[in-house]
């Protein structure tokens, strides 16, 4: 029996993106920049995977919908429908590199956490999820303003 590829559906990717976003913000609050950077990257990547599946442009030959090396190309294809997704994806890939080199920048993590556009996948989220996203963003903005970090 042939396995169906990818192994997750768009709803699962949306939920995983939200979960990664929440965990990334918790890690950031604890000062765990490296872990936060990785989870922030994953939050954006899983959002991208969800959108790729929604529009049928995901990879059907691999377990994941959008392999890392295809992220920029996939974001390019989605840019007209979701303005800013290409820039978001590039920022996520930059964070991945920072994570890999063990030198994540707090400013880059916060910037991407504030840019991830969950309205694009809101059909897979509920009002409680949206409220939690907004609370996390408000908290991030407040903290950044109090520390005078330009985002």
Image (cartoon, rainbow, N blue to C red):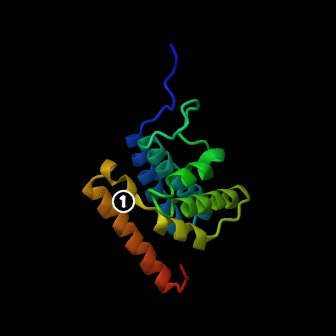
Residue, disc 1: 119
Where's residue 29, x and y in %?
50, 68
Residue lying farthest to the left in this orientation = 127
In the image, taking residue 77 as reference, residue 96 lies left or right, namely right
Q: Is residue 41 visible from the viewing direction of this image? A: yes
Q: Quadrant of residue 104?
A: bottom right
Q: Is residue 25 above or below residue 59?
A: below
Q: Nearer the viewer, residue 90 or 39?
A: 90
Q: Nearer the viewer, residue 85 or 67?
A: 85
In the image, taking residue 38 as reference, residue 116 lies left or right, namely left
In the image, taking residue 72 as reference, residue 126 lies left or right, namely left
Residue lying farthest to the right in this orientation = 101
Residue at image position (45%, 58%) is: 82
Residue at disc 1, secondary structure = helix
Residue at image position (44%, 77%) is: 141
Residue at image position (42%, 36%) is: 9
Q: Is residue 123 above or below residue 26?
A: above
Where's residue 107, x and y in %?
59, 73
Bin the neighbour count of mark 1 within 10 Å (Cα to Cα): few under 14, some 14-19, many 20 and up: few
Q: Is residue 30 visible from the viewing direction of this image? A: no
Where's residue 98, x and y in %?
68, 61
Where's residue 88, x and y in %?
54, 62
Q: Nearer the viewer, residue 38 or 130?
A: 130
- The mark total stands at 1
Residue lying farthest to the front in this orientation = 80
């Amino acid at each position: 029996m042939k396995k169906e590829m990818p192994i997750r559906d768009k709803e699962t990717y949306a939920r995983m993106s939200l979960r990664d976003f929440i965990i990334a913000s918790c890690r950031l609050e604890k000062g765990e920049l490296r872990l936060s950077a990785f989870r922030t990257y994953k939050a954006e990547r899983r959002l991208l995977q969800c959108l790729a599946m929604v529009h049928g442009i995901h990879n059907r030959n691999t377990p994941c919908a959008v392999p890392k090396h295809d992220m920029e190309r996939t974001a390019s294809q989605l840019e007209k429908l979701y303005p800013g997704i290409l820039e978001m994806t590039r920022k996520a890939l930059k964070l991945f590199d920072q994570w890999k080199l063990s030198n994540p920048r707090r400013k880059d993590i916060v910037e991407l956490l504030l840019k991830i556009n969950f309205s694009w996948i809101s059909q897979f989220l509920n009002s409680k999820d949206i409220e939690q996203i907004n609370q996390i963003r408000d908290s991030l903005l407040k903290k950044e303003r109090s520390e005078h970090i330009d985002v």
